[in-house]
Amino acid sequence: MGTSPYSIRLDDDLRKSLEEEAEIEDRPPAQLAVRAIRSMLEAKAAKRGAIDSALKEADQGKFISAEAVNAWIDSWDTEGELPAPKADIPRDRA
């Protein structure tokens, strides 16, 4: 895969922060910018995938109650951490 130049405008504070971080990491600022852009795009793609998956499950009538989700979240970082909840609301109640 090749590369091509791409020009962007940064405000002075952002440019300064990027250059400072690049100096700390002993990397070119452009390399950090590429990593940041790649990371952002991967996160957005993962979020879209999760949303698409949830919509497909909803279309199939698979719903999880707020109570089950809240219990799961409340268990995070405890010794009794629960697994991710599964659908617990029948289609006719959704």
Image (cartoon, rainbow, N blue to C red):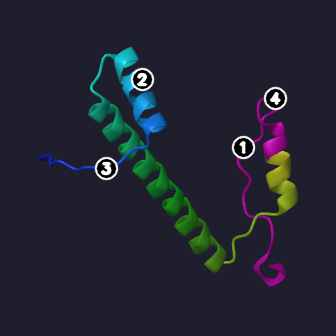
* Residue stretch in magenta: 73-94
Cα gap from disc 4 to disc 2, whole angstroms:
35 Å
The residue identified by callout 2 is 21
Q: Residues within 10 Å of mark 4 (few under 14, many from 20)?
A: few
Q: Position of residue 57 (x, y in %)?
A: 62, 71
Badge nearest the viewer, 1 or 2: 2
Badge nearest the viewer, 3 or 1: 3
| Residue at (17, 47) in percent of width and height | 5
Q: Are marks 3 and 4 in contact (CB under 8 Å)?
A: no
Q: Secondary structure at mark 2?
A: helix
Q: Position of residue 81 (x, y in %)?
A: 78, 35
Dot placed on the residue nearer the N-terminal end, 2 or 3: 3
Q: Position of residue 91 (x, y in %)?
A: 76, 79
Q: Secondary structure at mark 4?
A: loop
Dot placed on the residue nearer the N-terminal end, 3 or 1: 3
Cα gap from disc 2 to disc 3, whole angstroms:
18 Å
Badge nearest the viewer, 4 or 1: 4
What's the residue type where badge 2 is placed? Glu
What's the residue type where badge 4 is placed? Thr
64 to the left or right of 11:
right
* Quarter of the picture holding the C terminus: bottom right
Q: Main secondary structure of the magenta part?
A: loop
Q: Is residue 16 magenta?
A: no
Q: Residues within 10 Å of mark 2 (few under 14, many from 20)?
A: some
5 to the left or right of 73:
left
The residue identified by callout 3 is 8
| Residue at (41, 52) in percent of width and height | 41
The residue identified by callout 4 is 78
